[in-house]
Amino acid sequence: MSDPMNVLAPEHRRLRIGDAWRDAAGAATFAVEDPATGRIIAEVADAGVVDGLAALDAASKAMAEWAATSPRKRSELLTATYRVLTERSEEVARLITLEMGKPLAEARGEVAYGAEFFRWFAEEAVRVEGRYNTAPAGGYRILTVPRPVGPCVFVTPWNFPLAMGARKIAPALAAGCTTITKPAAQTPLTMLFLARIMEEAGVPPGVVNVVTTTRAGEVVSALLADRRTRKLSFTGSTEVGRVLLRQAADNVLRTSMELGGNAALIVCADADLDVALDGAMVAKMRNLGESCIAANRIYVEEPVREEFTARFAKRMGALSVGHGLDDGVDVGALIDEASVTKIDELVADAVDRGARVLVGGERPDGPGHFYPPTVLVDVPDDARMLEAEIFGPVAPIISFTSDDEVIAKANDTEHGLAGYVFTRDLQRALRFAERLETGMLGINRGLVSDPSAPFGGVKQSGIGKEGSHEGILEYLDVIYAAIDLP
C-alpha cells in the first residue's frame, strides 16, 4: 500500500500558529501510531502553555479584521475550503485511516460529511440577520445586530478527526470568529492537514490555528483562563465536559458541549425487519461503534426477538476485520489498547452476570488494537455495558414486552444524545418521539447526522447545537440598541 504520510510534509507536522508552521517550545514532539499495527507513523509538535497562548495571541490579533470581512468573502473562503477538501478527499481519507484505524470506506464517508459543513456554513454566512422594528409602546425603535463572540477554543476527539473539527471551524468562521483547535493526541495529523488545506484555500493567517499536544489539561486550562478567549466548544466524554464547564465558568464563556451517549435502539414487533436490520447495522457499526450516537443498547420486542437476533448476529459475524487500508475490510482497528481492554472487560462482566455471546466476544492474538463484532443476548439490567458507553463493535440485545417498559429503560440513563425506533405505526413512532429523552431520534433509519440538521443532546449529553442554522447562532452575540424616534 502507498504511504498516506507522503501527503503531509514534515514542516506541516508542526504547530499552525498565525502565519507560520512552527516547532513547539523546546522542540518537544510526540509520536503518532497506526492502531492497526502499533507502528509509529509520525512525530508531531508537542505544545505547552506558551504555545497555546501564542495561538491565542494570533487569533486575537486576527479577530478584528476577520470579523470585519464581508459575509460574502467569508462565504467564498469556506466554499474554497470545501472544494480543495473535496479534491483531496482520497488523501485525507487515507490519512484518517492510518492514524485512527477505521476502514477506508468509512474514512471516505467522513471526509464527504466533514466537507459538507464548509459548504453548508458558506451558505449560512450570508444569512445572518438582525431586525429593526417599532417598540410595542411606540416612541423608539429596536435594532438588533448579531456579531461574532470572539476567539474560540475547540477541543476535538479522535473518532472523527476531520468531521468534528469541520463541524466547529466552519460555523465559527462563517460567523466571523477566529479559532484555536486542540485535536486529540491520538489523531493530530488530520487536523494539521485540514489547516494546510484551509491555508491553500486562502483563509487568512491567524483565523485557523492548530495546537497539537499531549498536555491537553495544561494548555486548554491556560486558554480558558485568558480573558481573550470567548467561546469553548468540546466534543468528548461527559466526565471531561464537566471539568471544562467548571473552568469555563470563571470567565463566563459561551460553551457548546457534545458529550457522551448511551443510545437505545428499539425494534418493535410491527417493524419492517429488513429496514430494522439495515438501520441497526448502521447505528451500531458506523465508525466501528466508536461514536457517541452509536446504538449502545438494542431492545427488541419479544415476538420478533428470535428472528431479529439470529439475522443480526449472522450479519455481524460476516464482517471482516483487518487493517483499514486493506481491500474488503469492514471493521478496522480500535483507537488504542485501553479501548480494547475496556470493551473486553464489559463483555466479561456481562457474561459473568448471565449474558450469552452469540458472535465474537474474544479479542484476537497478534499486533494492533482489534476486537471482533460481538453480539450478546440475555443481558441483565445490571450489566455494566448497559450503563457505560461501549464505544466499540459490541451489541447487547434485550427483549421487551411493552412500550412503557422499553421507554422507561431507554430513559434510565444520565445521557440523552440519540435514539432509534423502528416501527411501521406512525402514531406509535410519534409517541416514542415525544417520550424518549434524547436530543435526536432516528425513526426507521440508523443515521441521524446531517450538516443541515441540529446535532446535540439533552440531559448530560451536552449543551447547544452543531450544524443547521442553529449551529451558527452558537458563535454570535445579539447586540440590542434602543433608538429614540418619536
Image (cartoon, rainbow, N blue to C red):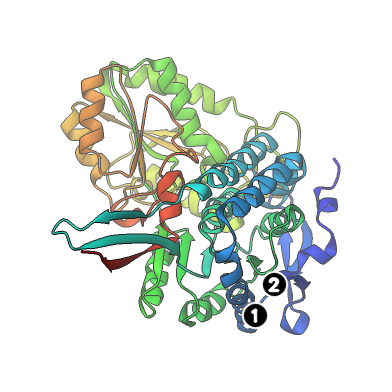
Residue 164 % position (x, y): 55, 52
Gap in Å between the C-alphas at discs 2 and 1?
Answer: 7 Å
Q: Which residue is mark 1?
A: 54
Residue carrying label 2: 17
Quadrant of residue 469 within the rendered picture: top left
Q: Amino acid at mark 2?
A: Ile
Image position of 441 with respect to 188: above or below: above
* Quadrant where the C terminus is found in the figure: bottom left
Q: Is residue 241 above or below residue 272?
A: below
Residue 48: x and y in percent read 64, 80
Task: Determine whether the residue tagged by mark 2 lies in a helix, strand or loop.
Answer: strand
Say if 258 sits above or below 410 in the image: below
Task: Give coordinates of residue 143: x percent, y percent.
Answer: 32, 61
Q: Is residue 396 left or right of residue 335?
A: left
**What residue is rendered at 41% in x and 60% in y?**
146
Q: Quadrant of the N terminus?
A: top right
Give the class, few, some or many, for how many residues have Cα within 10 Å of label 1's Cα (few <14, many ≥20).
some
Report if residue 161 is visible in the image: no
**Mark 2–mark 1 CB contact (< 8 Å):** yes
Residue at figure coordinates x 74%, y 70% from the top left: 19
Q: In which quarter of the view is residue 86 placed?
A: top right
Residue drawn at 46 percent across, 82 percent down: 227
- Image side of residue 250 versus residue 303, left or right: right
Front residue of 153/293: it is 153
On screen, residue 182 versus residue 261, left or right, reads right
Residue at (66%, 44%) from the top-left corner? 82
